[in-house]
Amino acid sequence: MSPDSSQVDKYYRNLKKEVELSGYHLNPDEEFTKELLRNILVNKERYGYGACPCRLASDNKEEDLDLICPCDYRDPDLNEYGACYCGLYISGDILSGKKKLTSIPERRPGPDQRVKIVGKSYGELSSSLQFPVWRCRVCGYLCARDEPPEICPICKVGKERFERFM
């Protein structure tokens, strides 16, 4: 059963407030955004988790962890293209009109290429980190990704206030 408009509206209001407090932006096209959110709710009902509606979920949460919204690819897509793959999240540059929205290629690796790190010690992990670790110089927030976030989700300073930590 598809979620009704009141459920979608409530999800939209809550998510919009939450993402803005974290320094992110939802797509300003409210109708488009609510349709994406409706489909995330459908996936929550169908699979028990909110898989990205623009990708095919397997109905196996372990295999789909990288697709649960916000997906693992959101931040790299925002940094490189100014929007995530499905267009739910956009950068401040897109929102302000400084940058134009373009198509975003799929960056999720195929099933054979996905690597799961299970049961490794910290030493093993730190010597084989896939991404650099960034530290907010203001509050100490740490994140592992290609680039620091546009805005620190904790203290709200800009990406220029981050330093490479590892």
Image (cartoon, helix red, strand yellow):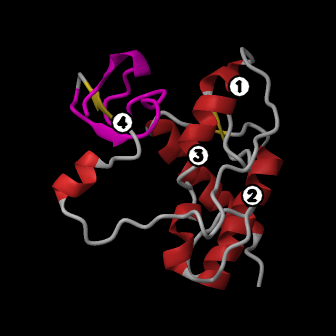
Q: Earlier in the sequence, mark 2 or mark 3?
A: 2
Question: What residue is pinned by disc 3?
Answer: 74
Q: Which label lies toward us, 1 or 4? A: 4
* Quarter where residue 12 is shown: bottom right
Left or right for 140, reference 11? left
The image shows residue 5, relative to residue 20, as above or below, that is: below
144 and 128: which one is in front? 128
- The answer for how far apart the CA atoms under marks 3 and 4 are is 17 Å
Question: What residue is pinned by disc 2?
Answer: 36
- The answer for how far apart the CA atoms under marks 2 and 4 are is 31 Å
Residue displayed at 28% across by 27% down: 136
Q: Earlier in the sequence, mark 2 or mark 4?
A: 2
Q: Earlier in the sequence, mark 2 or mark 1?
A: 2
Question: What residue is pinned by disc 4?
Answer: 132
Which mark identifies residue 94?
A: 1
- The answer for how far apart the CA atoms under marks 1 and 4 are is 26 Å
Q: Which stretch appears magenta?
A: 139-166
